[in-house]
Amino acid sequence: MNVDASGELRGSTVFAGNDVSFSEDFDFGSKELVPRIDGVFRLGQRNRLIFDYFQYDKSRDATLSEDLSYDDVTLPAGSFARGEVEFRLASLVYDFAVIDGERTSVGLQIGAEWAKLKGTVHAEAGEDSYRDSTSETGYAPVVGLRFTTRPGDRWLINVQGQYLDADWGDFGEYDGSITRANALLEYRFTPRLGAFVGYDWFKLDVERSGSNGLLGLDQRFKGPIAGVTLAF
């Protein structure tokens, strides 16, 4: 998958009796080529297990546009800074074909999704440096919908969407949701070997409340996909 990532960081708090909020758009510059793995296990005519895994790691170097202070150390504007983000998403769902025709199939999905998000910032100026990192891992039930059609003997079109609410599972103090949609077109050279192209889209929208206020992240990953199919 050739990923284009963009996001919005937002927050709100109360300072000196006044409500204070901010919203900042950000991205990680150039696109990133990342791995995706998908698997389908046929348990019967209408029953499937579907597995998928997505991984994104990206860092971006920048120069501080203003002073950064912590404790008794101040890193002046013009200092080196680096931001890193790591995102993992994996799901395993049971898919039941409520419609199972000769060339068209519609499936309802229910299962579990696991996600990990880690962010790190590092800045330095001379002998002074600053580094901080935070990470959250959790899982929750996921529901989805799939549509598959075969316009020809060697062609397959597959479209699916999935939704997860952080309140359903084990995501600590985070609230929000993960939404995903993708579509692909596959061609089989032989019954066991094929190739496909398509498009994938994720949206991670989470908020965390604390004693100092609320911090939110709206992170999106999107881009074309291409790969090979191996059938056994």
Image (cartoon, rainbow, N blue to C red):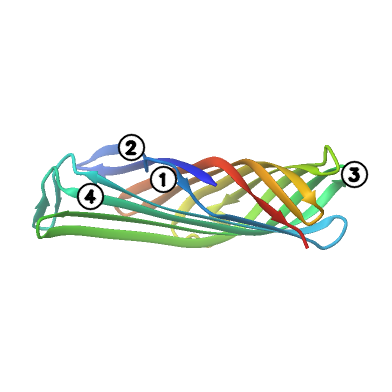
For badge 4, the amino acid type reads: Ala
For badge 1, the amino acid type reads: Leu
**Looking at the image, which residue sits at the far right?**
102
Distance, label 4 to label 3, CA atoms, is 56 Å
Residue 226: percent from left, percent from top: 61, 46
| Mark before the other along the chain sequence, 3 or 2 | 2
Query: Which residue lies under the disc numbered 4?
Result: 81
> Is 228 situated left or right of 217 in this image?
right
Query: Which residue lies under the disc numbered 3?
Result: 101
For badge 3, the amino acid type reads: Gly
Disc 3 versus disc 1: nearer the observer? 3
Name the residue rendered at 30%, 38% in the picture. 21
Using the image, tell me which numbered label, if any, was put on residue 217: 1
User: Taking 132 as reference, is 60 above or below it?
Assistant: above
Q: For numbered disc 2, what is the local secondary structure?
A: strand
User: Taking 123 as reference, is 29 above or below it?
Assistant: above
